[in-house]
Amino acid sequence: MKQIARFARVVIATTMIRLLSLSTGVHAQTVGADCTRYDRLNTRALQTETSTPACETMFPELGGARVWLADKGVGFSVGTFGPSYEYDVLGHNHTPQLYGGQDPNWSQLIYGTLTYDLSRVGFSSDAQFTIRGVWETSNYPANNPHFFSVNIFAINQRFLDGRIEVQYGYYPVIGQFYGVVLGGNASQAALGPVSVIPVEVGMSYYEPTPAVDLTVRDSSKRWYDHFSITRSTTPAGVIADVADNPTGFRLTVMGARAMFVNEFGYQTEASATSHAMWFRAGGIYNTSHYTDYSTGGVSSNNYGAYLAATVQITNPHGDPRGLYGDVKVDYAPQDRNVFTKDYQVTLYYLGPFENRPGDMIAIGLTRDYFSSDAQALERSFGVSPAAASLALSVSYAARVTRGLYAVSGITFQKNPAFAPVQPNALLIQENLYFSF
């Protein structure tokens, strides 16, 4: 079970960049309004993420290539997270590493996305195909695994003016629900994505899974119900899932069975007359068999639940800029999950200074509780486990120029690994994000 604490990934960069892209319209006038026409071709395949507008990329016209592609119904974008660096400056170097940043770690992630307007080939008037490839590498594969694969291969269709939305294909299901890149997870620098309970319970994160999604909205398009049938990731863990599915196209993976997700929520966008807010409650049921830590046998299923709220507290400019609060509470049964419950509270300010409207500052607190059954099992092996982990993170994302962000963060983490117990960590994180 030591390995579970090794699945670390610095999510400060994705937390900030995805939110910052919501406010980049304040810069569009410096490029020219014409580049905004490309945004209709941005992918819709990941509902909790917002693509960087073309006007905020390094080369909005791509030397004329974007307009040539757009005329043919094709959208194109490339993004790269990295080089990224993470290190526990308290000097707790250890071989082998037990958590992300215990030794100096670097990583690099590059993705390229193509979309196509399917109405040109006989689909409904609001249909889109997305294909995305991802390459990632690092000097610590247990932290950021080496892989090169298809990340999205999906069709998204909207009906009745967007009140009904259907998506099917291969994609990371966590990108459809929950909002893992919004706010609250910025402080989970050492424990990584498996400490996010929906990921632990089986939602795909690195590699895609085959899935069908249905979202139904009311006439105001604020209330919604979102349901998904998908394959879970393998119960053997995130690294095993990447190894078993190197291309991203595997229909089946060892031990992974059908999973069902439902999220009910309410969402509004920021405007001159309203604040942005997003309330959601979700449930996950996974038919895969997991290790039962209480008996040493195998469980018949796995499941989890979450409540989350993201609210714009202040709206000084009538747009997404302002102070936000993000709160999440998660639960999973302790007999089959190492992370059994958590709460996360984050405050972040988008556009904290008048002359820096594209920057963001965030402070987040996360408390993760480890399963008492898993703790007892570790003690039976003579290993001392932690009972809980507490993390406090402060981070700042600076818009260096169009298409380039620099993200800096520092995280104090009590119990940065589940077992064996480790000294408290003070992690620094540096990341560059480029978009083309």
Image: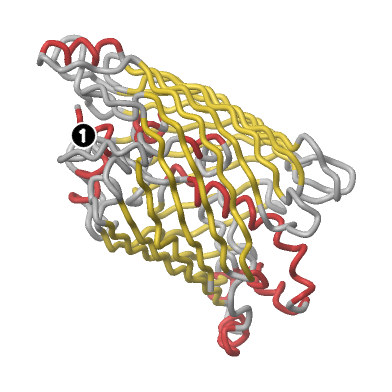
Q: Is residue 251 left or right of residue 380?
A: right
Residue that appears at 10% across and 16% down:
381
Residue that appears at 43% across and 35% down:
188
Disc 1: which residue: 3
Pick the front one: 190 or 427 = 427
Q: Quadrant of residue 327?
A: top right
Residue that appears at 73% across and 58% down:
356
Indicate whether 189 appears above or below 30. above
Q: Quadrant of residue 292?
A: top left
Protein image colouring: secondary structure
Q: Mark 1 is on which residue type?
A: Gln
Where does the N terminus fall, quadrant-wise? Answer: top left
Pick the front one: 369 or 105 = 105
Indicate whether 403 appears above or below 185. below
Pick the front one: 296 or 327 = 327
Q: Is residue 415 left or right of residue 79?
A: left
- Name the spot of residue 241 as percent of width and height, x first: 23, 45
